[in-house]
Amino acid sequence: MRQTIAFNNTAKYWKTRYSYTPSCMMHINKLFFTSPMHKIENDQNRMIWRHNDSSIFSSGGAYNSFFNLGHNAVSALAVSFNGYTKTKASTGNSTSSNKLFKSFSIEGNNQGLTLGSSMFIVNNNSTLGNLVDNHRFTPLLRKGHAVYGEIGKERAMTGTNIKAIGKISNVYRWQAFSEDLQTNLWRLLTDGGEDSDPVPIPGLHVDSDGLDVSPTITFNTSTPSNIHLYAFEIERFMSNNPIPASRTNAPNPGEYVKFFSGRVTEDEDMVSTPYYTLNPDPENPYTPNTGEYQYNFTEAFDFLGIQNYDFFLSYGDPYSNANNSFKKGNFLMIQVRNPDSDSSPHLRYERTPGCAGDENFISPYQFEAEPGEDSLVFQDREVLYAMTPGFINGADPQGSFADAFLVLNSADFEITSLNVEYEFSEYDHGGISSSTTTKK
């Protein structure tokens, strides 16, 4: 989009950007005139155009009608916010200060503003991976007397979208429904290699009457060997909400939350150990049913510095239905979907060092771990974590300045102010204390 940038000679800074390209611009008293860069078709040989002409508006025209485009033309504008202020009383310059941007709003007197869209870009870094997850136009939303545009969230994995759930005391996998006991049987996966028999745990999966019933999970086949429903027993939840705010009721909840482990080391430190896939044999790619530790998947200690949510595997999706919730007492119900698909982001827990590496009853894919580095749950050394993508719980975008782009469609509008609310980062180089500020 071609633009015109205007410079304020008094304040000595670039003040305004226009979404059109005139050959000249001028003010006469309070009237604003421009001339088009090129001759416009059917312009009746007009060389000078008056903007915000009330006579045109009163006769059924539109304030944003100029250069013979008429009121049906889309109106667009772009502004920059950098924290510079200049008033008669004082001048402040925080243009280079690191800011946490909180909101972007547009004030005006016409409901037609809600027909528009906006894009908000914080120029904190030229590295694509660190840019905010909102480099796209999103609809404006009216709240009260103001209209708000989305500012987005940082894509990077930060403390805002990673949450510790609690220490894992046991992990069970659904095995079968016992007709004799009328109860579901669950296989204990974290018994330290003792090869325990399936145990009845009533109440983990019930019908509308509260009676145990076999889970019906339709993603591949209805045979028990392909129903991978897990019950993670948590010794103590670290918060009242076991997972970060997410969209677990979405058609594909795995897009919004992933589960992984943290590991207690010999030095009593906690290390994040999400898993990711390897590709040793392109002809036989990773699937949850063919997952083999240290062969086609392994852990990423402390994320390996990787900030891409899609890079990591998950123990499964939160499982719930009309009669069963995701959280059942101290149990979290997690389901592995599409275990034979090479596009599944899931991981069968029994293939990980949380279990014993020599448990033949679980799978033919045994694994070897360093001495003392398997049966981690049996050793009380694993904590369950959840991660969410940046656009759900990412950190507020931060940087020294931001650009906002508005498209307001063809409806008549009048804008009185564009507002950005931000606060200074605690790590600001200028030593400015964190406080919320609004700039127009």
Image (tube, grey):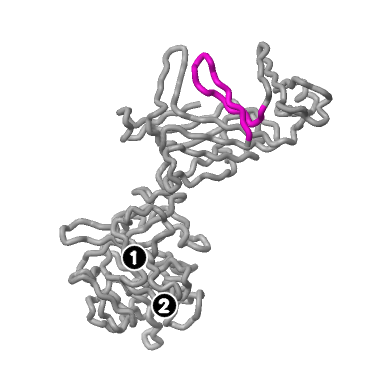
Residue positioned 44% across, 68% down in the render: 324
Query: Where residue 271 is drawn, which disc sits there?
Result: none
Q: Percent x, y for residue 421? A: 46, 32
Q: Is residue 4 magenta?
A: yes
Mark 1 residue crowding within 10 angstroms, few (<14) / some (14–19) / many (20+):
few
Residue 65, percent from left and from top? 73, 28
Place residue 277 in its image quadrant.
bottom left
Q: Residue furthest bottom?
A: 180
Foreground residue, 37 or 264? 37
Residue 257 or residue 202, whichever sits in front: 257
Is residue 334 visible in the rendered structure shown here? Answer: no
Please tell me whether residue 320 belongs to the stretch shown in magenta: no
Crowdedness of circle 2 by 10 Å Cα count: few (<14), some, many (20+)?
many
Residue sitting at x 51%, y 30%: 80
Image position of 179 with respect to 395: above or below: below
Q: Which residues are magenta?
A: 2-21
| 393 lies above or below 221 | above
Q: What residue type is disc 1 on? A: Gly
Which residue: 73% across, 20% down? 50
Where, by quadrant of the figure, is residue 348 drawn? bottom left
Residue 134 is left or right of residue 366, and the answer is right
Q: From the image, which quarter does the N terminus lie in?
A: top right
- In the picture, measured across the screen, residue 319 lies left or right of residue 39, that is left
Query: Which residue was labeled with disc 1?
Result: 329
**According to the image, label 2 marks what residue?**
212
Does residue 318 appear in the picture of this structure?
A: yes
Badge 1 or badge 2: first in the primary sequence? 2
- Horizontal and vertical percent position of residue 37: 70, 26
- Residue 316 at x, y percent in the picture: 41, 67
